[in-house]
Image: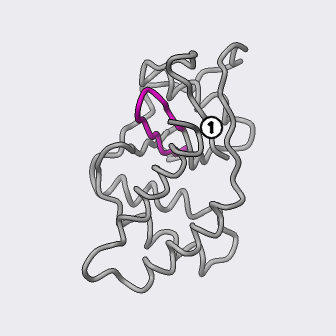
Amino acid sequence: MSQDNIVHTKNQWLYSHVEVNYPTKESIAGRAVYQSSAVTRTCRRLIEGGAVSKDFDVSNIYHVDFHRLTIAFALLQSKQWSDPEESALIVEFLSQIIYSEPCRLFLGYEAGETIAAAIVTQQDNITLISDIVVPEGRADEFIHGLCTKLNIQDTVQTPIFIES
């Protein structure tokens, strides 16, 4: 599996959540907003090596496994869209997520506030960390924290890719 394949896997997983019998028109529109942003994203290999100046406290990184956290994830993700209408559509789209492999959602908290989010996709010994939302300058810290929490390292046999 290549980096393009795992990105495709993640995107198809996301899109499938509104491929149901009676999707809302807002969730379909939200998927279209997300799809248009997805074409501008790039993917790079993590290649661990440099030390991160400060680790994100792994005890403050949570696996999203119930609906209230899904809503928190969707709300944080929606802040990436400056247009209020698009932002609302993203919330509708992402709040439809049902927990299933190969993707997992994660949230990071600090002082009781949700400040970070990401999707981790794992398949065929490849990991993709995507849809990363963090305060300015803290992406490496959060990514390193996720890798520590998940006990994964970027190696030849188990590459980690970052989509941004």
What residue is at 53 percent from the left and 37 percent from the top?
Answer: 128
Along the horizontal axis of the image, is 70 left or right of 35?
A: left
Where is mark 1, residue-wise? 162
Q: Residue furthest bottom?
A: 25
Q: Position of residue 144 (x, y in %)?
A: 58, 24
- In magenta, the rendered stretch is 116-128
- 116 or 4: which is nearer to us? 4
Q: Is residue 103 magenta?
A: no
Q: Amino acid at mark 1?
A: Ile
Q: Is residue 127 magenta?
A: yes
**Magenta-colored segment: predominant secondary structure:** strand
What residue is at 31 percent from the left and 44 percent from the top?
Answer: 101
Q: Is the residue 64 above or below the residue 73 in the image?
A: above
What residue is at 67 percent from the left and 42 percent from the top?
Answer: 43
Q: Position of residue 11 (x, y in %)?
A: 49, 56
Q: Quadrant of residue 139?
A: top right
